[in-house]
Amino acid sequence: MKGPAASRRPDAESWESAAPSPRASERKPFEREVRRALVLADSSKTEVDALLEELEPWIAERVGTVDVVRDLRTFTAEAERRRGKPVAELPDLAIVLGGDGSILSCARAFARHPVPTIGINFGRVGFLASVEVRDWEVALEEVLTGESVLEPRMRLTAEVNGGRGAGGRKIALNDVLVERGAVQAMLTLSLRIGEQWVSDYRADGLILATPSGSTAHSLAAGGPILAPSMRGIVVTPICPQSLSHRALVTHPDSVLHVRVEQTSGLTTLAVDGQGFQPLKEGDEVRVRRHHAAFPLLARPASNPYRRVRERLGWRGSFEPGPDLETERSVPAPAADEAGFDENEVL
C-alpha cells in the first residue's frame, strides 16, 4: 500500500526553494514513499485516544516505522527548546490527531525542517486539519498510494530589532501578532512596508497573517479571507481608534516593519498564538515571507471554498432553510386578532 518510490529523501527545506517560483503555491500530487510515519495525538481529547487505538495498528501494517507521540504539547516544547534541531529522525509523514491548534504545534515542532503533514480534525473549525474523523482511513490510504495532494502553505518569519532582540527568529504558519498586554490602554504602532511609511495605528494591536491565517484571528478582527493557494500578507488592525483604518493585503515579498511608538504597559509579540515575547517602546518587529512553505496534505477532491462555507456557516442558496420553514409553518394571525379592520383603507 505504498506510493511510488522516491529517488531520494528531500533536504530539510526543499519543499520550496529559497527563491520561490510563481507556481510554487500550486497544489501538486504527493507521490513520495512513506517509510517512516509520526503520529502526533492531542490526548487531552478522549475521542483521540479511541481513534489512536484503531489507527496505530492500521498504519503499522503499511509503513515500515511508526512513532507515536501522545503528549503533543511536551513534544513541541522540547523541539522549540532544541531551537530547530530535530528531536528524533525526521519522518516522511506526520499524522496529526487534533484541531488546527495541533497542526500549528506540529508546524512549530518542525519549523526549520518542515514535514509533510495531514490533519484529522478533532477541533471546532478544521481549516488546517481538514480530514473528517469518519474519513481517516480513506484519506490515509490516499496518502500512501500517491493520490493525496500537497498544498504548500506560505509562512512568515519575525524578528525583533533586526535579530538583536531576545527570542531570535520566529516562524509563523498563521500569523504574527503585536498587541497590548493586560493594561486596558491602546498602543501606538507604526507600520512601514519596505522603505515606505504606511500609517500609525492607535489600536489594541496589529495582526500580520498568511493566507492560511486569514481565516483565524485576522478574520475575527475584520480581515479578508485569502485563498490558501495565494501568496500575500494580510495586515489587520485590532479595534483601531480610527474607523477609517482597514485591513490591507500586501505583496508576499514585502518586508514589514512594526514599531512600538507608545505603550502604557506590557506589549507582546506572539507567533501563531504562542511564545509571547515582551516588547517596549522603540522595539521594531520585522516580518517577511519565509523561504520554505509548510507542506500540508489534503484529499484530492478537497475544496477550500467548501471548507470556508461549511466552517463559517454560509448559506449556499436563498431557498428557505429549516428555521425559515418553521417560521412559515406558524399560521398568521387573523386580521381582527391583529387589531386591524380588513376594510380599512390606509
Image: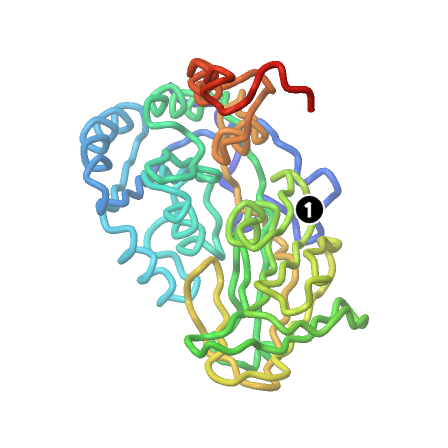
x, y (%) of residue 128? 47, 40
Residue 215 vertical position relative to residue 218 in the rendered view, above or below: above
The residue shown at (75%, 42%) is 22
x, y (%) of residue 272? 47, 57
Q: Which of 137 and 232 is in front in this view?
A: 232
Q: Amino acid type of disc 1?
A: Arg
The residue shown at (58%, 77%) is 187
Quarter of the image with the C terminus is: top right
Residue 31 vertical position relative to residue 227 in the rendered view, above or below: above
Residue 337 vertical position relative to residue 53 in the rendered view, above or below: above
x, y (%) of residue 43? 22, 44
* Quadrant position of residue 301: top right
The residue shown at (41%, 31%) is 34
Residue 114 vertical position relative to residue 168 in the rendered view, above or below: above
| Direction right: furthest residue | 196
Q: In the image, 271: left or right of 242?
A: left
x, y (%) of residue 123? 35, 40
Quarter of the image with the N terminus is: top left
Q: Mark 1 points at which residue?
A: 231
Q: In the image, 199: left or right of 333?
A: right
Q: In the image, 320: left or right of 246?
A: left
